Image (cartoon, helix red, strand yellow):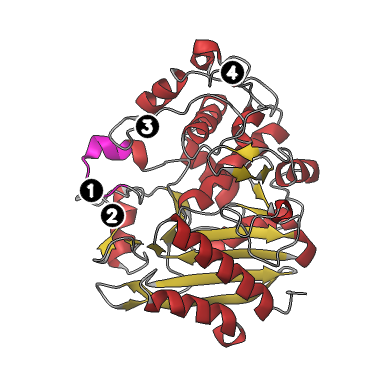
Amino acid sequence: MKTNYPELVKTIEAGIATGLHPGAVVHVRQNGKIVADFAVGAADWAADTTLRPDHRILWLSAGKPLTALAVGILSDRGRVSFDAQVCNYISEFAGNGKDDITVRHLLSHTHAYRPPRLDWPRMSRDQVIEQICHAIPIKGETPGQYAAYDPQSGWYLLSEIVERVTGQLFHEFVKAEVLEPLGCHHASIGMDADKWTAARQAGELAVLYDTTRAARERINLGVEDGHFNEASVAQWVGDDAQRASAHNPGGGSIGTASDLAALYQCLLDDGKTPTGAHLLRNSTVEEMTTRQRIGMKDHSFMQVVDWGLGFLINSSRYGATMDPYGYGQHASDKTFGHGGMQSSSAYADPENGMAVAIIFNGLPGEPKHQKRVYEANSALYRDLGLST
C-alpha cells in the first residue's frame, strides 16, 4: 500500500537517513474506507526490528482528546457542564481566586492560572491535584480572555472531574466508554505491569527514541519491574512514583495508529461508533470540533491558534508558514485534531472526509519535528491528489 504514497514515504525515509526517527506508521481513512495502513523503518534501532502497522506506540499529547471525549460523554449524560465552574466538581480548586474558571476554559486552554510544575511521576495523583489546586491566577488576566496551551495540569483536572462524577478510575472509564466502543481493544491510557511485560516480550511495542542527541537514546517505556511509564521520563523510577504516571491523562496513551485514527473517524461520523451507536451527540461533536477560541494569541506557542474543546483547529488562516502541530499546506480550514509531543500528528479533515494518524518513533526537538510533520502532511495530501 505504501507504494501509493511516494512523496510521504520519501519524507519518512529522508528523516530516517538524517536520524530524526527510526521509522513511522501511517493510517488514513477517507470517506470511511482505509486508504493507507503501512509502516516504514524500524521499531527499535538497537534490536533492528522492522516497524509494523500493528505496533503500539505512545501517543503522548495526541491522546489528550480521549480525556476531552470522556468529558463530552458526561456532558451528554447531564453529569458535567462545559460552562460549570471547575470548583463545582473539585471544591478545593476554588482557592487563590480560581472559582470562576470553567470546564470550557480548561478544554480551550483559556483558564488563565499559572500551571505549577508537576514533578510526576514522583508525585502521587493526589499530590498532583493538590499542587494544581494551589495554583494562582495570572495577574491581570481573566479566564476566557487569556490563551496559553497547558500540556498537563488542565488535563489532570478534567480527569479528576471524571473520577469524582463517576466514581470510576479515569483510565477505566475511558477504556470502557471510549476505546472499547470504538473497537480500539489494544489502546489504553497507561498499562499495568503484567500487560506491559507481555506486550514487550511479544514484540508489540515500538520504541521511542530521543534523537536530539548524537547518540541514539531510547526513551524509557517502563521501570525495572515492567510497569509502563510515560515517555518523557528519562530515568527509571520507583513503584510508588510509577502509579502516578501510568495513567497520565495528558500524555500516557498508547495504541496503534489505526486506533488513533478510529477516534477521528467517529467524530467524522457524527459521533457514531462502528456499530452505529452514538458515542457523542451530533451537537456535542460540533461544539467540540469547531472554533470556540478564535483569533487569540497563544502565549505558549507565541502565535495565534484557534481551539475547539480539546482540539486544535487548523490555524493556517492566520498566515504562519508552519502552525505549531498543524496539518500541513493543504488541509481544509475545518481540520481539527491534536498532535503528540515531537512525534505524532492525528486529525480529521471534514471537507476531504479524512481521518489521519502519522506516528514517528523519534523525538528530534520542536523545530525539526514541526518541519517534519508539515512536510509529511503536505506530502500525504499531494499523494492523495488533494493539493489543489
Residue 258 position, x and y percent, is 55, 65
First in sequence: mark 1 vs mark 3: 3
Say which residue appears at 69% left-offset and 47% top-offset: 279
Residue type pointed to by label 3 = Leu
Q: CA distance from mark 1 to mark 3?
A: 16 Å
Q: Which residue is the site of mark 3?
A: 118
Query: In what element is the residue under mark 2?
Result: loop
Question: Within the image, what quadrant is residue 141 found in?
Answer: top right
The magenta region covers: 233-243
First in sequence: mark 4 vs mark 1: 4
Question: Within the image, what quadrant is residue 86 found in?
Answer: top right
Count residues near mark 3 (Cα–Cα under 10 Å), then give few for <14, some for 14-19, many for 20+.
some
Contact, CB < 8 Å: mark 1 with mark 2? yes
Residue type pointed to by label 2 = Asn
First in sequence: mark 1 vs mark 2: 2
Residue 140 disc label: 4
Asked whether, in this view, residue 307 is left or right of residue 20, the answer is right
Residue 324 position, x and y percent, is 57, 53
Query: In what element is the residue under mark 3?
Result: loop
| Observer able to see residue 221 | yes
Question: Within the image, what quadrant is residue 18 found in?
Answer: bottom left
Say which residue appears at 59% left-offset and 31% top-offset: 106
Residue 20 position, x and y percent, is 39, 69
Q: CA distance from mark 2 to mark 3?
A: 19 Å
Query: In what element is the residue under mark 4?
Result: loop
Q: Which of the two discs, 3 and 4, sits closer to the camera? A: 4
Q: CA distance from mark 3 to mark 4?
A: 24 Å
Asked whether, in this view, residue 54 is left or right of residue 216, the answer is right
